[in-house]
């Protein structure tokens, strides 16, 4: 929600309010911003958090779609491990493949 309202506390904001001496990200030393914090930081921990945030959102979409008539249309997803899905009580339908897209598939 804070990213939507522009109030996500970044190093850039801390510098603006006089609470930091640098505009750089504390994790990777690159210029900091909301976009950088949410998906651009190259720090491994931040990258893993961004990937997991994506996977959780995808799992929620799959769970919702599988309850309706549209569930039969889902044939391929890349939303994390079976362990993570089980933690959220999500069992994919038999015909749904959960794996990374093959390299030969065109990136549309």
Image (spheres, helix red, strand yellow):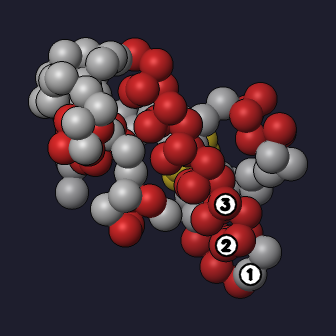
Left or right: 57 in relation to 11: right
- Secondary structure beneath dot 3 equals helix
Contact, CB < 8 Å: mark 1 with mark 2?
yes
Separation of residues labelled 3 and 2 (CA atoms): 9 Å
Which residue is at 76% across, 56% downward?
A: 93
- Residue 62 rendering spot, x and y as whole percentages: 65, 61
Residue with the mark numbered 2: 65
Asked if one can make out residue 85 in the rendered structure from this viewpoint, the answer is: yes
Residue with the mark numbered 1: 68
- Residue 5 rendering spot, x and y as whole percentages: 37, 68
Q: Residue 32 versus residue 48: which sits nearer the camera? A: 32
Asked if one can make out residue 33 in the rendered structure from this viewpoint, the answer is: no
Separation of residues labelled 1 and 2 (CA atoms): 5 Å
Dot 3: within a 10 Å radius of its alpha carbon, few (fewer than 14), some, or many (20 or more) residues?
some
Which residue is at 19% across, 16% downward?
A: 29
Judge whether 94 appears above or below 26 on screen.
Answer: below
Residue 66: name its quadrant: bottom right
Q: Residue 34 versus residue 39: which sits nearer the camera? A: 34
Residue 68: name its quadrant: bottom right
Quarter the C terminus occupies = bottom left
- Residue 16 rendering spot, x and y as whole percentages: 19, 44
Nearer-N-terminus badge (3/2): 3
- Secondary structure beneath dot 2 equals helix
Contact, CB < 8 Å: mark 3 with mark 2?
no
Residue with the mark numbered 3: 60
């Amino acid at each position: 929600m804070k990213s939507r309202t522009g109030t996500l506390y970044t190093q850039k904001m801390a510098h603006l309010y006089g609470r930091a001496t640098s505009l750089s990200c504390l994790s990777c030393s690159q210029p900091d911003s909301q976009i950088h914090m949410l998906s651009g930081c190259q720090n491994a921990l931040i990258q893993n958090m961004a990937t997991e945030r994506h996977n959780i959102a995808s799992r929620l979409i799959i769970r919702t779609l599988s309850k309706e008539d549209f569930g039969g249309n889902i044939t391929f997803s890349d939303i994390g491990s079976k362990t993570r899905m089980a933690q959220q009580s999500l069992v994919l339908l038999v015909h749904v493949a959960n794996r990374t897209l093959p390299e030969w598939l065109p990136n549309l």
